[in-house]
Image (cartoon, grey):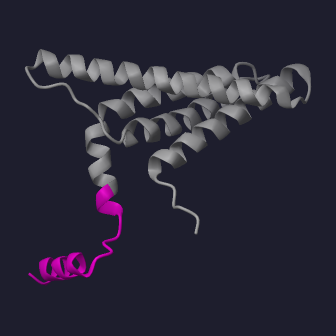
Amino acid sequence: MKPKLDAKEKGFYGIMIIGAAAGLLEGTLAHGFSLRYVFPGAVLTLCAAFLGGFGGFLSKDLMRISRGLKPYRGVNNDGMMLGSFMGTLLGTLAQIAGSANGANILIGSMVGSAMGAWLGAMSDDFVSPMLALLESPTSSSAKKKMEGECSR
Protein backbone atom coordinates (compact mmCIF):
# COMPACT_ATOMS: atom_id res chain seq x y z
CA MET A 1 0.00 0.00 0.00
CA LYS A 2 1.32 3.46 -0.92
CA PRO A 3 1.66 5.89 1.96
CA LYS A 4 -0.46 9.02 1.77
CA LEU A 5 1.50 12.26 1.39
CA ASP A 6 0.83 15.00 3.91
CA ALA A 7 0.55 18.71 3.11
CA LYS A 8 4.24 19.40 3.77
CA GLU A 9 5.40 16.68 1.36
CA LYS A 10 2.96 17.80 -1.32
CA GLY A 11 4.20 21.38 -0.95
CA PHE A 12 7.84 20.26 -1.18
CA TYR A 13 7.25 18.31 -4.39
CA GLY A 14 5.15 21.15 -5.79
CA ILE A 15 7.97 23.64 -5.15
CA MET A 16 10.43 21.34 -6.92
CA ILE A 17 8.15 20.81 -9.93
CA ILE A 18 7.33 24.51 -10.37
CA GLY A 19 10.98 25.52 -9.93
CA ALA A 20 12.08 22.88 -12.43
CA ALA A 21 9.43 24.03 -14.91
CA ALA A 22 10.46 27.67 -14.46
CA GLY A 23 14.12 26.79 -15.05
CA LEU A 24 13.25 24.73 -18.12
CA LEU A 25 11.01 27.45 -19.55
CA GLU A 26 13.54 30.23 -19.00
CA GLY A 27 16.41 28.13 -20.38
CA THR A 28 14.36 27.05 -23.37
CA LEU A 29 13.37 30.60 -24.26
CA ALA A 30 16.94 31.85 -23.89
CA HIS A 31 19.04 29.01 -25.32
CA GLY A 32 16.76 26.45 -26.92
CA PHE A 33 15.29 23.27 -25.45
CA SER A 34 17.62 21.45 -23.10
CA LEU A 35 16.84 19.46 -19.97
CA ARG A 36 19.94 20.71 -18.16
CA TYR A 37 17.99 23.72 -16.87
CA VAL A 38 15.57 21.58 -14.84
CA PHE A 39 17.86 20.68 -11.94
CA PRO A 40 19.22 24.18 -11.27
CA GLY A 41 15.69 25.57 -11.33
CA ALA A 42 14.46 23.08 -8.76
CA VAL A 43 17.48 23.48 -6.47
CA LEU A 44 17.55 27.28 -6.60
CA THR A 45 13.85 27.48 -5.81
CA LEU A 46 14.22 25.08 -2.87
CA CYS A 47 17.18 27.09 -1.55
CA ALA A 48 15.16 30.29 -1.81
CA ALA A 49 12.29 28.61 0.08
CA PHE A 50 14.69 27.52 2.83
CA LEU A 51 16.20 30.99 3.17
CA GLY A 52 12.78 32.63 3.20
CA GLY A 53 11.52 30.22 5.84
CA PHE A 54 14.67 30.73 7.92
CA GLY A 55 14.22 34.49 7.73
CA GLY A 56 10.55 34.19 8.61
CA PHE A 57 11.17 32.03 11.66
CA LEU A 58 14.04 34.25 12.75
CA SER A 59 11.97 37.43 12.51
CA LYS A 60 9.03 35.69 14.21
CA ASP A 61 11.28 34.61 17.09
CA LEU A 62 12.76 38.11 17.39
CA MET A 63 9.26 39.61 17.57
CA ARG A 64 8.18 37.05 20.19
CA ILE A 65 11.29 37.62 22.30
CA SER A 66 10.83 41.40 22.12
CA ARG A 67 7.32 40.93 23.57
CA GLY A 68 8.66 38.72 26.37
CA LEU A 69 7.37 35.39 24.98
CA LYS A 70 9.29 32.18 24.42
CA PRO A 71 10.65 31.60 20.90
CA TYR A 72 8.39 29.56 18.64
CA ARG A 73 9.74 26.13 17.79
CA GLY A 74 7.77 24.76 14.89
CA VAL A 75 7.31 21.03 14.68
CA ASN A 76 5.53 20.52 11.39
CA ASN A 77 6.44 23.64 9.36
CA ASP A 78 3.26 23.17 7.32
CA GLY A 79 2.65 26.91 7.02
CA MET A 80 6.12 27.56 5.68
CA MET A 81 5.87 24.83 3.05
CA LEU A 82 2.36 25.72 1.90
CA GLY A 83 3.24 29.43 1.80
CA SER A 84 6.36 28.66 -0.17
CA PHE A 85 4.39 26.56 -2.65
CA MET A 86 1.83 29.30 -3.22
CA GLY A 87 4.55 31.94 -3.45
CA THR A 88 6.45 29.87 -6.00
CA LEU A 89 3.35 29.44 -8.12
CA LEU A 90 2.29 33.08 -7.92
CA GLY A 91 5.82 34.42 -8.42
CA THR A 92 6.31 32.29 -11.52
CA LEU A 93 2.94 33.26 -12.98
CA ALA A 94 3.52 36.95 -12.24
CA GLN A 95 6.92 36.87 -13.92
CA ILE A 96 5.53 35.05 -16.96
CA ALA A 97 2.69 37.58 -17.25
CA GLY A 98 4.94 40.60 -16.76
CA SER A 99 7.78 39.59 -19.05
CA ALA A 100 7.44 40.08 -22.77
CA ASN A 101 10.24 37.66 -23.68
CA GLY A 102 10.10 35.26 -20.70
CA ALA A 103 13.24 36.57 -19.02
CA ASN A 104 13.88 35.94 -15.32
CA ILE A 105 11.09 33.41 -14.85
CA LEU A 106 13.28 31.48 -12.42
CA ILE A 107 13.96 34.68 -10.48
CA GLY A 108 10.21 35.20 -10.10
CA SER A 109 9.90 31.64 -8.84
CA MET A 110 12.70 32.13 -6.32
CA VAL A 111 11.45 35.48 -5.03
CA GLY A 112 7.90 34.17 -4.74
CA SER A 113 9.13 31.09 -2.93
CA ALA A 114 11.16 33.10 -0.43
CA MET A 115 8.37 35.59 0.25
CA GLY A 116 5.76 32.83 0.56
CA ALA A 117 7.96 30.86 2.96
CA TRP A 118 8.59 33.99 5.03
CA LEU A 119 4.87 34.76 5.29
CA GLY A 120 4.04 31.10 5.89
CA ALA A 121 6.56 30.92 8.72
CA MET A 122 4.83 33.85 10.39
CA SER A 123 1.52 31.97 10.50
CA ASP A 124 2.99 28.50 11.02
CA ASP A 125 1.58 27.95 14.51
CA PHE A 126 -1.97 28.39 13.17
CA VAL A 127 -1.74 26.27 10.03
CA SER A 128 -1.01 22.83 11.51
CA PRO A 129 -4.04 22.87 13.88
CA MET A 130 -6.25 23.97 10.97
CA LEU A 131 -4.99 21.09 8.85
CA ALA A 132 -5.68 18.70 11.73
CA LEU A 133 -9.28 19.94 11.87
CA LEU A 134 -9.71 19.24 8.16
CA GLU A 135 -8.78 15.58 8.57
CA SER A 136 -11.77 13.28 8.92
CA PRO A 137 -12.13 11.59 12.30
CA THR A 138 -11.46 7.88 11.92
CA SER A 139 -12.20 6.53 15.37
CA SER A 140 -15.75 5.74 16.42
CA SER A 141 -15.34 7.68 19.68
CA ALA A 142 -14.45 10.82 17.73
CA LYS A 143 -17.50 10.31 15.51
CA LYS A 144 -19.76 9.86 18.55
CA LYS A 145 -18.29 12.96 20.14
CA MET A 146 -18.92 14.99 17.00
CA GLU A 147 -22.48 13.64 16.70
CA GLY A 148 -23.13 14.52 20.33
CA GLU A 149 -21.87 18.06 19.81
CA CYS A 150 -23.95 18.48 16.67
CA SER A 151 -27.18 17.38 18.35
CA ARG A 152 -26.90 20.04 21.09
Secondary structure mostly seen in magenta is helix
The quarter of the rendered structure image containing the N terminus is bottom right
As displayed, is residue 126 above or below residue 143?
Answer: above
Q: Which residues are magenta?
A: 132-152
Quadrant holding the C terminus: bottom left
From the top left corner, tell me how far across and down residue 67 is, in percent.
10, 20
State left or right for residue 123 relative to residue 71.
right
Image location (x, y in percent) of residue 45: 60, 26
Q: Is residue 8 magenta?
A: no
**What residue sits 31% from the left and 37% below the top?**
124
Q: Residue furthest right?
A: 32
Residue that sits furthest to the front in the current view: 1
Towards the viewer: 120 or 2: 2
Q: How many marks?
A: 0
Q: Is residue 139 magenta?
A: yes
Residue 18 is drawn in which quadrant?
Answer: top right
Horizontal and vertical percent for residue 51? 47, 20
Residue at image coords 22%, 16%: 62
At 29% from the left and 35% from the top, the residue drawn is 74
* Percent x, y of residue 4: 51, 61
For the point 7% across and 20% down, which residue is it? 68
Q: Is residue 126 above or below residue 147?
A: above
Image quarter of residue 139 = bottom left
